[in-house]
Image (spheres, grey):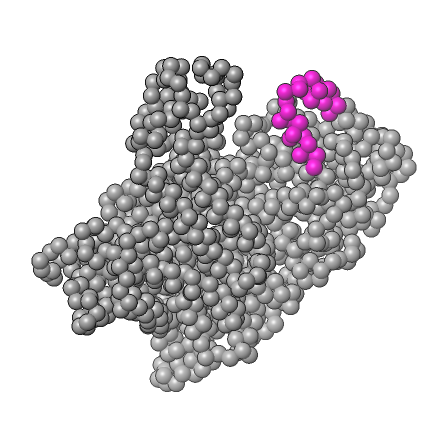
């Protein structure tokens, strides 16, 4: 956001689009500027400045999610090279907590959006389903914090999980049937028991303290 | 699920109490008379059958008369002396001496009676698996703020509201209560206001309400102990002061923090010591449960010693020691601790309520209608108002708001119990209002436990409150939950928001880096949570299969999905490469047959020398039998993958091992004496061997030209059709799907200490994990 002459209007526009309040937008904007070094856009390298993120095992997936065009609602696939503030807000809006005044339909839509975000993180080749390879990669990354672990452990766990998913989604399978991968509908089925709308949120309420990133 | 007989299982819990009271009414005269004539009666009956000085614990009874009594004096013996010579006492072969065992006998009898009542009315609930307990802890930590507010502010509100209103009532002329001062009333208020954990647990366990509500009320009842202790002592002390100054109040406020935080601190210290001790108990497994019990009890006593909150110390020590001790102790100790605690808690609960009943019936009472009725009324009102007010406040900060239904359950579930009674009982005997207080306390307890306790269940059903979900946690859920955790932590870091996830992550990291190394023995500290969870799940499913009487019956949970369904590259061989020439095939077959025979021979020789020759190795036999069973169930589990065992197996694996105690089943590296049993194909006479060889052949065909595809072959290759191949073989060497790498790995994981040291069959394909 270059010049702020019609700032409040822009803020209002963004608020309507993403659902944040203007306070939260201001705050996120400050954070955005910190990350980008006062540039209008962020590229991947900017995320390297966050020290705490280094320790996160799924770091690369998280960063990728920011640039995923599907999350940015720009295209059905592909990655962007850089994102501006509006895109940043769009990604952040996936993590808004639910509000009391939402009705059933809104809640359902909200939930689906969050799950879609997660789905895109798993499905790295943008083909619309999570294949065994992708799942294996996910588990490997999750366990990457332990250098002592053999690769096979991760693989076996992923295989076991995949088979469980297959049995949940398809049920009994003949030996010659092949389960291609977890589609989004199957993904929804797996997540049925867990209420993600209450879990997948970040509290944007009190964010006065902004740590300085180097 | 429960025997829905006569209007709610929660009523049944009160029934043993009722029976206990009724029965004790009958016992009362006996107790009384017994109390009146202790010594002379007992001294006149020397315990002939037992050495002098040893008796059943009756205090105050004179030690039995010297042994010469037995020979010399003509007896006033109770037992019929059916020996022939009346002038000389014959050796008493059989006798009765009830007084000797009277006390423990009666106590045991009453406990037994109460337990039988419980048995009669209860359906024993299914054994909960490991996961819900940890779920409850997670729910607890997430809702800690709410719980603390309810516990502290709620109890304070109850105490002061009740005390104040009672003081008002006491001021009314004509009630006969005018002499009760404000401080007395406040003291009474503080005694009666605390929600009781025992009562809550007893009732809420029956109604299977959703975890959130359960933990809110239960957590509140546990944590309000600190408040109760402080208020009680405060008002007791203040009653002796001529004037209460502001400083005193301030000190009281301060003492609250000291009591609660001090209690937690004591608990943490004991928890850490217990965890540290458990690190070294790998050689003496039998005393592990003792350590856990003793350290916990010591934590409680130490806290009570300093007038700190004993309950909080107990909770803190339990919470701190649990993850580390669980990782260190053996499977048997774990089971022992679990069941002992359940048993003791059951007994204690029964005894508490019996004590309450006896005191009701046999104690001095002073009944004052006004006092009792107004106490009851104000208790209810205070609770409702408190919950409503606090929920309104708390809901501003909660993501998952508490609905009015939830609020009703929380308010209705505020049961009073034995803690209130004990505090009243402990009042100084000279306190003028003691009897009246006790009467009122007992009435309130009766009312809340009976009326509220019994009706809460139908109300829960009526209001359609969300019940506990009985779903088992799947591996998918575990993966997703962890993924989500990391994702949220990452987002919080990006936002720059030091939230809940950030601190949790930091704590975990600190725990992993420093604490686990100190408190957990050996290599187990490095096992990540996902792997541990996976092991646990596998073991549980394996055990379930075995226990369900395995052979031929596949539980419905196990589906027929196998590796082929998800990884098509492991599908049949025909498309992969051209057939080998005939003589090459023959050659391969010959090699295989030789190898298989060699294995059999080796194993047979092992048999001769160890199993038969040494009849005292019963344990080994047991182990072999179990392995055989496991092997048989492997045939059934064609879709279970296993994680190759880490060098030193995780505690979950070693717990599932049989010889976890005396036959310390430590994985040894490469000792040739180790009885490593591998799956051995059937003897050449059986028709299956040919199939097996073909199977091997197919696998062999697959391997040579595709080393890069080796990566893909690592899944299990057993097919569904092979399953019923070994119906009832008693042979340890059950026919399997051949000595493929997958079987090796499965073996390793399930029981074996490691791969065979003998590099023979199909070596190049087995990635050496040792």
Q: Can you tell which quarter of the image residue B595 is in?
A: top right
Q: Can you tell which quarter of the image residue B155 is in?
A: bottom left
Q: x and y percent of residue B152 in the render?
A: 30, 61
Q: Residue at x 45, y 56 (%)?
A: B14
Q: x and y percent of residue B354 in the render?
A: 40, 49
Q: x and y percent of residue A45 in the render?
A: 45, 61
Outermost residue, front side: B86
Depth check, front residue: B99 or B537? B99
Boundaries of the magenta span? B603-629
Q: Is residue B450 visible?
A: yes
Depth check, front residue: B181 or B597? B181
Outermost residue, right side: B582
Is B131 placed above or below B246 here?
Answer: above
Relative horizontal placement of residue B656, taking residue B338 as reference (left or right) = right
Q: Residue at x 41, y 35 (%)?
A: B102
Outermost residue, left side: B242
Relative horizontal placement of residue B192, taking residue A42 as reference (left or right) = left
Is B392 placed above or below B320 here?
Answer: below
């Amino acid at each position: 956001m270059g010049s702020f002459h019609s700032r409040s209007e822009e803020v209002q526009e963004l608020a309507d689009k993403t659902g944040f309040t203007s306070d939260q937008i201001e705050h996120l904007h400050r954070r955005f500027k910190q990350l980008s070094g006062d540039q209008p856009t962020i590229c991947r390298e900017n995320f390297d400045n966050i020290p705490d993120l280094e320790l996160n095992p799924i770091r690369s997936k998280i960063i990728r999610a920011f640039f995923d065009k599907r999350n940015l609602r720009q295209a059905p696939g592909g990655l962007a090279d850089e994102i501006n503030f509006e895109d940043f807000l769009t990604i952040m809006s996936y993590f808004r907590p639910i509000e009391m005044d939402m009705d059933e339909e809104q809640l359902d839509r909200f939930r689906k959006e969050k799950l879609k975000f997660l789905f895109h993180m798993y499905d790295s080749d943008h083909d619309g389903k999570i294949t065994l390879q992708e799942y294996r990669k996910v588990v490997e990354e999750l366990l990457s914090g332990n250098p002592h672990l053999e690769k096979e452990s991760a693989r076996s766990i992923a295989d076991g999980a995949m088979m469980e998913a297959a049995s949940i989604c398809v049920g009994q399978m003949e030996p010659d049937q092949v389960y291609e991968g977890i589609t989004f509908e199957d993904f929804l089925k797996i997540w049925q028991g867990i209420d993600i709308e209450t879990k997948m949120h970040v509290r944007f309420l009190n964010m006065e303290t902004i740590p300085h990133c180097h | 699920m429960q025997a829905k007989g006569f209007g709610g299982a929660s009523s049944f819990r009160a029934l043993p109490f009722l029976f206990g009271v009724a029965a004790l009414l009958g016992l009362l005269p006996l107790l009384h008379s017994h109390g009146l004539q202790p010594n002379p009666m007992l001294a006149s009956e020397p315990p002939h059958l037992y050495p002098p000085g040893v008796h059943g614990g009756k205090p105050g009874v004179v030690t039995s008369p010297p042994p010469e009594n037995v020979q010399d004096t003509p007896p006033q013996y109770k037992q019929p002396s059916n020996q022939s010579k009346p002038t000389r006492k014959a050796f008493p072969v059989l006798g009765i001496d009830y007084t000797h065992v009277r006390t423990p006998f009666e106590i045991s009898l009453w406990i037994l009676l109460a337990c039988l009542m419980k048995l009669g009315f209860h359906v024993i609930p299914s054994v909960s698996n490991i996961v819900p307990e940890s779920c409850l802890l997670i729910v607890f930590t997430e809702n800690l703020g709410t719980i603390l507010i309810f516990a502290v502010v709620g109890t304070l509100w109850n105490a002061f509201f009740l005390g104040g209103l009672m003081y008002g009532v006491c001021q009314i002329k004509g009630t006969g209560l005018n002499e009760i001062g404000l401080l007395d009333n406040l003291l009474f208020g503080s005694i009666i206001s605390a929600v009781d954990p025992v009562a809550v647990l007893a009732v809420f366990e029956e109604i299977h309400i959703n975890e959130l509500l359960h933990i809110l009320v239960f957590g509140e009842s546990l944590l309000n102990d600190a408040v109760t202790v402080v208020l009680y002592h405060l008002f007791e002390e203040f009653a002796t002061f001529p004037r209460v100054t502001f400083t005193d109040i301030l000190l009281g406020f301060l003492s609250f923090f000291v009591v609660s935080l001090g209690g937690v601190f004591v608990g943490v210290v004991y928890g850490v010591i217990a965890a540290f001790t458990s690190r070294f108990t790998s050689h003496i497994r039998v005393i592990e449960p003792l350590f856990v019990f003793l350290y916990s009890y010591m934590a409680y006593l130490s806290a009570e010693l300093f007038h700190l909150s004993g309950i909080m110390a107990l909770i803190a020590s339990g919470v701190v020691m649990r993850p580390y001790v669980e990782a260190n102790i053996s499977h048997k100790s774990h089971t022992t601790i679990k069941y002992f605690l359940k048993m003791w808690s059951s007994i204690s609960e029964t005894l508490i309520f019996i004590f309450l009943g006896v005191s009701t019936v046999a104690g001095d009472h002073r009944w004052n209608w006004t006092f009792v009725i107004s106490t009851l009324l104000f208790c209810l009102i205070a609770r409702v108002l408190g919950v409503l007010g606090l929920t309104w406040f708390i809901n501003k900060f909660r993501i998952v708001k508490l609905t009015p239904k939830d609020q009703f359950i929380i308010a209705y579930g505020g049961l009073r119990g034995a803690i209130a009674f004990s505090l009243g009982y402990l009042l100084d005997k000279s306190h003028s209002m003691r009897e009246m207080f006790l009467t009122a306390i007992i009435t309130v307890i009766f009312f809340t436990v009976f009326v509220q306790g019994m009706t809460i269940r139908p109300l829960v059903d009526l209001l359609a409150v969300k019940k506990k979900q009985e779903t088992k946690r799947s591996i998918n859920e575990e993966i997703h939950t962890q993924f989500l955790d990391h994702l949220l932590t990452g987002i919080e870091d990006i936002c720059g928001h030091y939230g809940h996830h950030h601190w949790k992550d930091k704590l975990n990291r600190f725990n992993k880096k420093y604490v686990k190394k100190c408190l957990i023995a050996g290599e187990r500290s490095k096992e990540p949570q996902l792997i541990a969870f996976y092991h646990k799940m596998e073991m549980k499913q394996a055990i379930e299969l075995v226990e369900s009487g395995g052979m031929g019956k596949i539980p419905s949970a196990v589906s027929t999905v196998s590796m082929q369904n998800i990884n098509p590259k492991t599908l049949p061989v025909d498309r992969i490469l051209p057939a080998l020439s005939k003589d090459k095939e023959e050659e391969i077959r010959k090699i295989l047959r030789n190898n298989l025979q060699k294995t059999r021979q080796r194993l047979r020789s092992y048999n001769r020398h160890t199993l038969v020759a040494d009849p005292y190795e019963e344990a080994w036999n047991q182990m072999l039998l179990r392995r055989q069973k496991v092997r048989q169930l492997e045939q059934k589990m064609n879709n279970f993958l296993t994680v190759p065992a880490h060098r030193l197996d995780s505690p979950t694996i070693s717990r599932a091992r049989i010889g976890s105690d005396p036959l310390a089943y430590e994985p040894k590296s490469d000792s040739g004496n180790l009885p490593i049993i591998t799956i051995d194909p059937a003897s050449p006479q059986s028709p299956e061997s040919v199939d097996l060889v073909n199977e091997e052949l197919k696998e062999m065909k697959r391997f040579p030209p595709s080393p890069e595809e080796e990566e893909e072959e690592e899944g299990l290759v057993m097919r569904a059709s092979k399953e019923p191949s070994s119906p009832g073989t008693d042979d340890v060497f059950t026919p399997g799907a051949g000595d493929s790498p997958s079987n090796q790995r499965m073996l390793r994981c399930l029981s074996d200490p490691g791969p065979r040291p003998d590099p023979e069959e199909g070596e190049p394909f087995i990635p050496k994990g040792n």
